[in-house]
Image (tube, coloured by chain):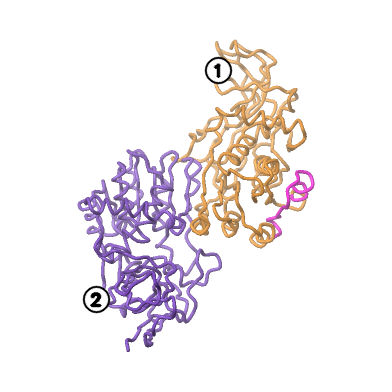
Chain colours: A orange, B purple
């Protein structure tokens, strides 16, 4: 009988996640109940939002992961047993399948994915939640117009890289903010960004001044903190700031650093708006067909950073916060 | 020959304004040059924005007042000499006339006001810049819908009182935040607000929880700081925050306190947008005719706090920051 290894949350992390915040357990894989499918996870997504799910928060968009519960995570896998007429053994599916080797599902929230269309990990990145976040956050909230200047932080990450490339496709001038020379080279030379700013080495405010002489029309923020504050000093008139996340703040043990320069919103007649990707799931096909086309034509590139082994979570998860990952961070937990 | 007493900025204030940041001087009133009018100031407006004009800021919407220059201020007065065919001696006019007894103007930015329509100080408040700010900020940016919950801070001030009353006219539930029992009584009993929160005595977060059980749909912010952060914890889905000002922060000698809870914008899918009243001056007639009608019918009440004597500036100015003023703060500098 197959064993299902699982990471369960055993304590709420304070600051950065530690291995001791989880238990690594195993239990036998059971047969599906009526209406259920059993999925063998192949790739599990590591997303910054998971850090928030570990907190006991009263004011969140999703309930926290309960203590003792398998850690919540998006994944793609293969159906290995089915008592649900909508799914057949061998189907590839994606959904909130958890930090474990096998998952059970009644089919709700489970989507079939086609591995002939793209490699499976891409369905956790560019053709998954991060890609939809980038697409709708940029186009629906940021509303970039041709010729405008778009700045994106976390630009080499799963969301940021897509944001910047779509902005280029839409005819914008694009500046990415990322950590390290190699990521900056990647953004400019491989993804076609107009410029990249290495926040680990450069003075971000001065670099924005240099690269955005007409100011910033759209800022897509994945990081918060000092970079958000630097951008606020360079807004163009009627700028739109898309607040997608604040990875610089997720491991804080003190209060979140609010943007001290927010009064620039008055001077620039600018707006700052939050985006929640789940609101756009009903329109997912619109984004996926556009992005699928761009991927096929080579206009959009997708990069995944695939780490072997379920058991490396949560150490691998920390790469998101140090910025060590190159592209969408994914755990490979079984051979396809 | 008449003397013109003037307050000139002599040093950039650090923290709260001090009398020693200004010189109080006099010079003879001269005749108008060709195309000019000479105006005798009757009422001078004291506005929170003036504090910002005193700073050496590179990133502002208007150049700072230069050292040695007469302090910039809105005022209404009477034309006492004219070599401009558009203005006649005896006309009442409003504009950026400065902290002085007499002003010269070539007519640009000078508006005739009709003292039969409303008492002159009202043209510095409800029918002036603060009223336009309230009208367009609330209706164009806040976009309140009937039945929604609107919260306004600085609610007993020149802008806030108009915001709340217009929101009531539009069928909203309105909660004002103000300092002191008397202001709160005024908001509820005289202006018809549904509730008022005394931030000097109450726990604002708890009071918002009590008075806004369905969350806050529109927040019009005049104060920033901790009150903005408290509101961010109670946003309804798709809430709109209008950033008009941050009087709690204008005298800071340290950095502005950014809203630590700004990530609630994601959870609530909310937006935060700055408003600059000057953008709406071309549409001023729309607001003034609506508000003139509401004033005439008694739906909109206007209150001015009139202090006698030009020489009391800048002490009187400090009332804005302590919250001692009751209604639009105006200096009376001459008999009409």
Q: In the image as oriented, which residue stretches furthest toward the left?
A: B189
- Residue A70: name its quadrant: top right
State the residue in front, B39 or B255.
B39
In this rendering, would B54 be left or right of A325? left
For disc 2, the marked residue is: B335
Q: Chain of mark 1?
A: A
Q: In the image as oriented, which residue stretches furthest toward the bottom?
A: B1
Label 2 or label 1, whichever lies nearer to me, is 2
Residue found at x 47% / y 54%: B274
SS under mark 1? loop
- Quote the CA–CA distance across marks 2 and 1: 81 Å
- Residue A213: name its quadrant: bottom right
Residue A106 tag number: 1
State the residue in front, A50 or B104.
B104
The image shows residue B261 at horizontal and vertical percentages of: 47, 49
Image quadrant containing the N terminus of chain B: bottom left
The image shows residue B263 at horizontal and vertical percentages of: 50, 46
Q: Using a 10 Å C-alpha cutoff, classify the residue at mark 1 as few (fewer than 14 neighbours), some (14 to 19) or many (20 or more).
A: some
- Residue B114: name its quadrant: bottom left
SS under mark 2? loop
State the residue in front, B297 or A142.
B297
Q: In the image as oriented, which residue stretches furthest toward the right?
A: A189
Can see residue A151? no
In this rendering, would B198 be left or right of A76? left
Residue found at x 65% / y 40%: A159
Query: Magenta region: which residues?
Result: A184-202
**So how many labels did they put on this image?**
2
Q: Is residue A193 magenta?
A: yes
Image quadrant containing the C terminus of chain B: bottom left
The image shows residue A75 at horizontal and vertical percentages of: 64, 28
Residue found at x 74% / y 27%: A118
């Amino acid at each position: 009988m197959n064993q299902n290894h699982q990471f369960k949350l055993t304590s709420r992390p304070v600051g950065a996640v530690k291995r001791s915040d989880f238990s690594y357990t195993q239990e036998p894989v059971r047969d599906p109940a009526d209406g259920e499918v059993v999925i063998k996870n192949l790739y599990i997504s590591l997303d910054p939002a998971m850090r928030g799910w570990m907190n006991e928060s009263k004011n969140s968009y999703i309930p926290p992961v309960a203590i003792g519960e398998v850690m919540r995570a998006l994944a793609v896998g293969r159906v290995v047993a089915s008592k649900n007429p909508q799914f057949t053994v061998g189907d590839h599916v994606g959904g909130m399948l958890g930090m474990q080797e096998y998952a059970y599902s009644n089919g709700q929230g489970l989507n079939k994915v086609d591995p002939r269309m793209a490699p499976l990990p891409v369905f956790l990145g560019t053709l998954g939640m991060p890609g939809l976040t980038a697409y709708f956050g940029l186009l629906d909230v940021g509303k970039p117009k041709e010729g405008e200047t778009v700045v994106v932080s976390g630009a080499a990450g799963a969301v940021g890289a897509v944001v910047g490339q779509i902005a280029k496709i839409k005819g914008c001038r694009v500046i990415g903010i990322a950590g390290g020379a190699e990521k900056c080279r990647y953004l400019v030379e491989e993804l076609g960004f107009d410029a990249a700013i290495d926040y680990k080495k450069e003075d971000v405010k001065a670099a924005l001044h240099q690269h955005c002489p007409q100011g910033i029309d759209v800022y897509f923020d994945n990081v918060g903190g000092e970079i958000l504050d630097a951008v606020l000093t360079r807004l163009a008139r009627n700028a739109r700031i898309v607040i997608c996340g604040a990875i610089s703040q997720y491991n804080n043990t003190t209060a979140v650093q609010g943007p001290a320069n927010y009064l620039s919103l008055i001077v620039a007649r600018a707006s700052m708006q939050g985006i929640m990707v789940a609101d756009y799931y009903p329109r997912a096909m619109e984004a996926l067909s556009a992005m699928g086309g761009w991927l096929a034509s080579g206009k959009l590139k997708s990069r995944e950073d695939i780490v072997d082994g379920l058991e490396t979570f949560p150490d691998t998860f920390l790469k998101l916060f140090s910025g060590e990952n190159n592209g969408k961070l994914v755990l490979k937990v079984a051979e396809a």
